[in-house]
Image: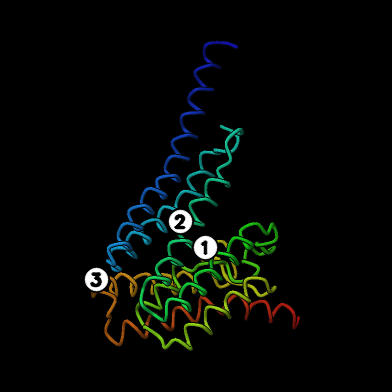
């Protein structure tokens, strides 16, 4: 191997490792979120989870831009991403639900157990993505769901119904949108995602007690994001 080839190989390795390190930084932020949960500082907890969501949103495009998989084929970025995603999308939100004072200890722990169990099964399912890049079944975005629980503080019956309903939907062939990768109606989906994000930030600033317009914005954007892919799925089936 020539000196130039050796230098190129080392450069490729360093670039790939830098991208993977950026992905792995999400787990450090997750640890800080866990500390915030222990202190019952829920605005800080969800703000940190939001930061991990930002990392997760940009690390994939960066990895594809620099062709990380070909630069360092011995390292699985997908496996690393799954580890970070499970902690931030599932485990920590389940812990928040269990300790957030929504219901009795027995009910809260049972619901948290349902979340971590069903999501672990979902993460192992190789069919989680459809041909149009939508998710097959509820994609275990419990960080968003539990955030809404903290904002709206629903009655115990609603909490149980929503959690169990989404757990069942995890295993059903119902489409859920990927805000960026699903091409159909993408501009509208991105607008809805932006509205949700802005309303969520305002809710955090207000200590998870937003004004009525912000709460309505959250609900409308959530309804769109939760149903748009299923509507598209029905339209495709009717063709």
Q: Which residue in the protein does label 2 denote?
A: 57
The label on residue 52 is none
With respect to residue 171, does 220 lie above or below? below
Quadrant where the C terminus is found in the figure: bottom right
The percent position of residue 34, horizontal first and vertical second, equals 36, 58
At x 49% / y 74%, what residue is drawn?
A: 188
Labels 2 and 1 touching (C-beta < 8 A): yes
**Marks 2/1: CA–CA distance:** 9 Å
| Horizontal side, residue 119 vs residue 144: left or right | right
Q: Which residue in the protein does label 3 denote?
A: 205
Residue at the front extreme?
106
Q: Which of the two discs, 3 and 2, labels the residue nearer the N terminus?
A: 2
Q: Characterize the local packing of mark 2: few (<14), some (14-19) or many (20 or more) Cα atoms within 10 angstroms.
A: few
Residue at the left extreme?
206
Numbered circles on residues, count: 3
- Observer-side mark, 3 or 2, equals 3
The foreground one among 80 and 10 is: 80
Quarter of the view holding residue 123: bottom right
Quarter of the view holding residue 119: bottom right
The foreground one among 230 and 139 is: 139
The percent position of residue 38, horizontal first and vertical second, equals 32, 62
At x 64% / y 73%, what residue is drawn?
A: 175
């Amino acid at each position: 191997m020539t000196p130039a080839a050796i230098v190129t190989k080392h450069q490729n390795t360093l670039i790939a490792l830098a991208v993977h390190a950026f992905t792995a930084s999400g787990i450090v932020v997750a640890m800080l979120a866990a500390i915030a949960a222990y202190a019952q500082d829920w605005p800080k907890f969800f703000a940190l989870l939001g930061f991990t969501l930002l990392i997760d949103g940009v690390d994939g495009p960066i990895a594809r831009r620099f062709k990380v998989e070909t630069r360092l084929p011995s390292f699985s970025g997908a496996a690393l991403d799954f580890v970070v995603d499970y902690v931030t999308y599932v485990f920590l939100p389940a812990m928040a639900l269990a300790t957030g004072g929504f219901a009795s200890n027995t009910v809260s722990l049972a619901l948290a157990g349902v979340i971590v169990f069903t999501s672990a099964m979902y993460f192992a399912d190789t069919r989680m993505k459809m041909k149009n890049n939508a998710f097959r079944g509820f994609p275990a975005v419990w960080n968003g769901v539990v955030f809404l629980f903290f904002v709206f503080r629903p009655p115990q019956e609603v909490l149980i119904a929503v959690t169990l309903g989404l757990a069942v939907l995890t295993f059903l062939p119902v489409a859920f949108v990927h805000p960026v990768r699903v091409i159909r109606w993408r501009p509208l989906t991105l607008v809805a995602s932006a509205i949700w994000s802005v309303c969520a930030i305002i809710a955090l600033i207000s200590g998870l007690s937003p004004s009525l317009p912000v709460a309505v914005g959250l609900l409308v954007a959530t309804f769109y994001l939760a149903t748009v892919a299923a509507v598209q799925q029905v339209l495709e089936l009717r063709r």
